[in-house]
Amino acid sequence: MPSLVSPLTRMALVLYCLVPVFAGTVAAQAQTISEINKANGFHEILMGIGPGFTAAVKSAPGTPPQKVQDALAAAMEGAFDPEKMEAAIEARMADKLSARDLSELASFYASPLGKQVTALEIQASSPQAREAKKIEGAKILGELPSRDPARLALYRKMMDDISAVDTGEAVALNMGYAMLSEMLGAAGKPLPDDQVMALLRKQTEGLRRDIDNDAMESAAYIYRDMSMADLKLYDAFLASPAGSRYYDQMQVALGAVMTDEARSFGHRFFVALG
């Protein structure tokens, strides 16, 4: 079983990394959770999770045997369905934000700064831009300590303001745990929770560092041409009561829904393996 853990946790990290730290699309006036999620690009991100997950696993180093590829395809049928996930997330977020929160969120996404930010995020979220984001983001991030330490510190503050690394680690571990425990159960070899988590943590050393690097590289690449003044205004929105409450509730709901999907996927995957 240990040989299965690394691929599982890699899948969980892949899924987390498919969800950008900041989600954006062309802003529109919005007054409900559903409309807010559509205005900031969350809807489009959910649409890409399933296909992106399959593509990422297939392109990972070491092509899996055909039997594993077939089992993956079978397990992915109906998995991470965007419409189902979106409905579940909206249900979890229902009544968590006030009318004032929604109004302030809508105003930001419809503002010139909101449109600027979301346009940059759209450009960086395309499949063609993913490799460039990784390569160029790492290069830019490596130069910032000496070239522009103030910008580096602001990127770090932005990550901290939305608890990007803490949330990413929790989501990845929860998804890895869900998949692993379901696979063990499907194999007729269930383990106590503490043993499953110990096995998972042993195979996820460096997970937090990887998530932190990914988040910072993404920020360095996406916002590389924004002025410091605009970045500070964006950070002020993220740290505002409305922005904080929205991201807190969205991340909790997203993590719970993706964990449920991971649990279902893990069970179907192991059953498909026979």
Image (cartoon, rainbow, N blue to C red):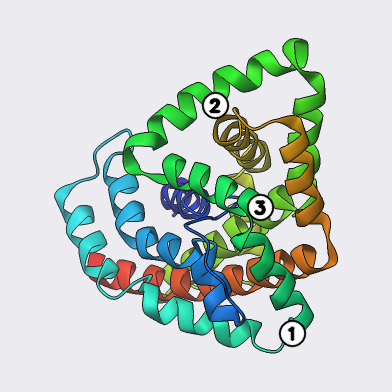
Q: Residues within 10 Å of mark 1 (few under 14, many from 20)?
A: few
The residue shown at (64%, 32%) is: 226
Query: Going from the N terminus, do you reach mark 2 or mark 1 first?
Result: 1
Residue 113 showing in the rendered view: yes
The residue shown at (36%, 44%) is: 126
Along the line of sight, the residue nearer the viewer: 71 or 222: 222
Query: Going from the N terminus, do you reach mark 1 or mark 3 first?
Result: 1
Position above or below: 270 against 145: below
Quadrant of the image containing the C terminus: bottom left
- The numbered dot on residue 99 is 1
At label 2, which amino acid type do we have?
Gly
**With 234 as the anchor, is 188 left or right in this view?**
left
Residue 204 x %, y % = 60, 45
**With 149 as the anchor, is 42 left or right in this view?**
left
Residue 37 x %, y % = 54, 71
**Where on the picture, by quarter, is residue 116?**
top right
At label 1, which amino acid type do we have?
Ala
Residue 187 showing in the rendered view: no
Position above or below: 75 against 214: below
The residue singled out by tag 3 in the image is 169
Regarding mark 1 in the picture, which secondary structure is present there? helix
